[in-house]
Image (cartoon, rainbow, N blue to C red):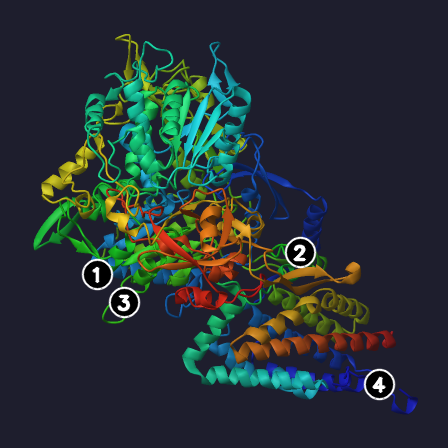
Amino acid sequence: MNSENKVENPDSGDLASIFSFRAQVYSIIRHLFLFEPSREYLQSLLQNEVLKAIGEAYPEEYLRTSSQEFLKAVREVLEGGDDMLLDTWAEYARLFIGPSPPIAVPYESFQRDAYGDRRFKGDTWMEVKEWLLDDGYVLEDKRVLEDHAGIEFEYMQLTSMKASELARKEDRDTLFNVLMRQKKFLEEHLTKWIPELCSEIEEKTKSSFYRSLAKFTKAFLKEDLNLLDEALTCLSEGK
Amino acid sequence: MANQQISRRSFIKLGIVAGLAVAAAATLGIPAYEKLYLTQVPPEKIKAIKEKIKRNEVQVKYTACVMCAAECALEVWVKDGRVVRIYGNPHLTYNSGGAACAKAVSGLQLQYSPYRIQYPLKRVGERGEGKFIRISWEQAVDEIASKLVQLKKKYGPECLLTDTGDVTDRDQYWRLNFAFGSPNAVEHGAICDTPRRHGPKLIVNGKRWEPDILRPVPVRMPDGSIQWYNKHDAKLIIYLGWNPFTATRIVWENIGTVRARAENGCKVYVIDPGFSNTAALADKWFPIRPGTDADLFAAMLRYILEHDNPADPRRRYIDHDVLVDTYVEGWPEFLEAFKSWWNKVDPLTGKNYFTPEWAEARTGLPKEDIERLAHEFGITKPAALIWGMQSPGHHYNGYVASILGCVLNIVTGNFERIGGVIDTEIVKSSKGGTATGKQFNSRKVKRTVNGVEVEAEQEKLHYCLYGDWPAAWDDVVGDLPRMIQEGITLRYGPFRGHKYPIAAYILRTGNTLVTAGPVYKFIEAFTAKKPDGTYKLELYVVIDTIFLESALYADYVLPEASFLERMSLSDIYPTHPVIFLRDAVVEPMFEAKKPTDIMNMLAKKIREYELREFGRSDIDPKDFWEKYKSEEDFVNEMLSVAPGRPNAGRPLPFPNLPEGYTLYGTPESLDAGQVQIDHEKKIVRGEPVTVEYLRRHYGGTMWPMSWYRYKVWDAEKKEWKSGGILTTKTKKLELKFHRYEGYNKLVAEAGEAPPSWKELGWEKLPLTFYWFETVWNPYTNPQYVKYKAEYPFQLISARIHQAMSGTHMCEWLAQTPAEGLWIPLSEPFELKMAETTPGGKAIVSVKKALPRNMWCIGTVQINRVDAEKYGIKTGDLIVLENPLGRKAPAKAYVCETVRPGVIRMGFATGGRFAPGLGGTYMHRLYTPNHSELLDYKHTPVMGQTCFADMVVKIRKASVDELKTLLPAYYQTEYRIEGVGTA
């Protein structure tokens, strides 16, 4: 960029908002991978300003259209009444839980470990567990495992919240480290398996709700990595 | 699309937009974040956890396997809360010599399978549609309990049938069932091999006769010490229809057969239509025609009786010292009844019954071989004649073979002889005791029958014993479809005339739909509806770790803790008292719960609903959650009756204790005399065996072995008497079947024999030798000769190494070929697997196209001579069809290892439509499900499905035809992933 078009770095307040924004999006994705959506939750999504704003905030066309598609699908489920809600819950089970073999087993070690020996608590599970420990987190609830997609999104959510707080306090050094960790986690874990998982869901789900969620999740992850790159660059320049 | 990365401008814009959005979200009061799973913990705790991981600690724990009914002792390595290795337990060498087989090790695949049931599920589609939603345990327990109480109100608690499938770990569910008020609780034994066990039950109150080849065994020495006795004494073992090397549940039989042969020159003969792995080791294979085991045994007995000569050492077959009134009840009558057939002429063969010529015509074995078998068995001492589960256990007339098998062993003096034959049931350690809850069945209950109020014990409501199967002491599950469709009418006992439906079925770790009888019959019953459109079976609950076909039709599916996550006691087949602890070595994953917890949760909720509905409850907190605060409490109560066996035999296990008294307590305390003796009840009580005790002893313990345990020395009269391990009415080996007397009395009081007895022309059960033919056998039963020409093949099934219908989900086992029954003859298919990218930098998921013949599938064996007649080669697709019009596809395996005129297939190896079975599921459309080809036919008296009685015709088939050959439940496209697409 030449000096005439030089753009100033975002201020701390903007950064805090960005990271808070990210935390909210991760919170949504996290919830929908961990749980079947209740009527109340779906209604809250339609009112969620963050979701609505994604189209405006991000340059990536794909992310904009996928978020709009997702909101449309949410609306359809709500308008479909109890039957459609039940079908959505049944589809959640079919996709992620069973009892038939799930279409998209939402566990990283299943998706990435070993030669055909796909199972829970593989080596990648341990890697994720140790990663979380390194950042001070433990999973005490045994109903899921550490490498569940929802838990990995939860990690991103929590660390985004932390980043927001650090930005507000203008603790740029610590913020830089937190963002680096996030970037690494995206590169070494989330983007290694979630995009493909989402592609499987898109291809095989019967539900437009989950199809659009999968598209949106894939798009957001990709953009989030780009965003982190930019944020880290900003922080480096500001040092 | 242009690569639109976030630029600095767009990043700033994002900040502004985000700021507005987040602020707006806060204004609307929408909670930004909800309760999360991850907890931030203090650095010192993190440090402690990381140090623990860094130390790379492995915890070594001990438990017992469930991958087959051998239930071997295991050593399990646990690291960071996950099981990383499964080995045999080197400290408890019983059963496996301290080794673990491939089945045990593949338990890891079950434990960490993504296809295991993780959460409670509720059906939302039709039964069989496979459409479920996840619900909480609270909701599941509430709805199930509520429904059970509604049904109790409507029909009485007896409308509940609890089927605990596998024998092991069932006690909590039985306790709940009985306390609820239903006497109807069954287990796998009902569909396993009741005819096989019939003779032992009648004669010694036992179950399974096995050769005395478990070595080493702990034995009392003359100097009082216990030493390992490691010598083999058996000189001849005859296995009829029994295949320890592939299908055994008794690993020591496998090892012992090899050792006895190598170390003692023991001869091994295998009598089987198939050349099994055991036959491959044997000295001779006798390829008997299916369904003729009783014929062979009868001929052997006749030969022995006719040729026995105590004065000639070359003909001294019979042990006349045993065949005396002291030990054997009813021999003269048995002999007379047996001999009464000798002059009768068989209408089918024109020969006199039980002669070698007659047996030759029936069995297809040369008469010289029959005589040789009889002579060698008679003259060789010690020897063991062993008969199997599939045969005669799955034949309509299996009882006859079972009785004759026992008699052959007894008359030759081999029962309880060192190196002879042992009944594993009457020597194994007792377990269960009052924990199982059978005492609830003694409660007095009232019913109004034909307008009259009747009061009697709860047990008198039993759906079989007072229904159509009064002598089915192992219950009946094969006939469940009819019972669901028609309901129960009690024919016998004080509640005679009382009617009730089977309205609720709780199935735990069983797969009745596939393993209990014709699949279509069970599906018809589970989906049958009443005129109002509701299901006849109003509540169907499946409790399991893995999802099998039976669960596809359930209303609720509850996740039970796997065998590595729960505590119980193993149920094994030893030659002396042995007990292993099944210990929970890791915590249950996801929302799986232990049986004790499930029992308590349901009991609590049932009580709540009963109090609300009836103002009282049959469930007392003191019998459930107040008494059993943990599974350890429950298991300790089960252990309180260990070993529960007599101090009998030679050498006397505990010479310091009274002979013949029943022993309870640890072997150390009994040995040390730290006991209390009750001379009135003839009981000796040492220190109780507990979970803690077993843990201190590497997970198990055993008491000394001895032999001739039915002979007890009466010190006062200075003579031997019969008793000890025999708990028959007379305490003798009963060849007069006193056991039948009670049933006869019950039936006589009603004045009408049950339908299955009438099939044989019986108004009462004969109290001595009897004979009747099997069904669907054109070589022995004139009624079926008409099918011989058009249906020239007898159809039999055999077990392979995947012992249970559920273990197919373990892919490691899936890739081991077995005996022409499980062979890599798959059609091309795709498999998703993980693979490294070039350079090994990353692991990616790839779909691989596997060509033909890469994967093991269930196949059928057909003899080369037969195959040539039909132009069939190995790998050809064929269709099997029985006279009832039922069809099944198969791939042929042409060989010389099966008798001509026989089609042999694996049990539960094909046509499996539970999607979690991976490759086995994918190949369902062209692999045979044996249960599709069955007649809805049950053995008389015990109601066992006649798995081994059928004839078929075959022809070549095309792939296109096979796609539509099978019923809809095979065709349904349940999604599977991780393994490929169908």
Q: CA distance from mark 1 to mark 2?
A: 54 Å
Q: Residue furthest front?
A: B869
Q: Is residue B279 or residue B176 the one in the foreground?
A: B279
Going by the numbered disc 1, the residue's amino acid type is: Lys
Q: Position of residue A13 (x, y in %)?
A: 74, 81
Foreground: disc 1 or disc 4: 1
Q: CA distance from mark 3 to mark 2?
A: 46 Å
Going by the numbered disc 4, the residue's amino acid type is: Glu
Quickly name the residue at label 1.
B154
Q: CA distance from mark 3 to mark 1?
A: 17 Å
Q: Quadrant of residue B311?
A: top left
Respond whether the residues carrying marks 2 and 4 are from the same subunit. Answer: yes
Labels 1 and 2 touching (C-beta < 8 A)? no
What secondary structure is marked by label 4?
A: loop
What secondary structure is marked by label 2?
A: loop
Residue at mark 4: chain: A
Going by the numbered disc 2, the residue's amino acid type is: Tyr
Labels 1 and 4 touching (C-beta < 8 A)? no
What secondary structure is marked by label 3?
A: loop
- Callout 2: few (<14), some (14-19), or many (20+) C-alpha neighbours within 10 Å? few
Quickly name the residue at label 3.
B529
Q: Is residue B97 or residue B261 the one in the foreground?
A: B261
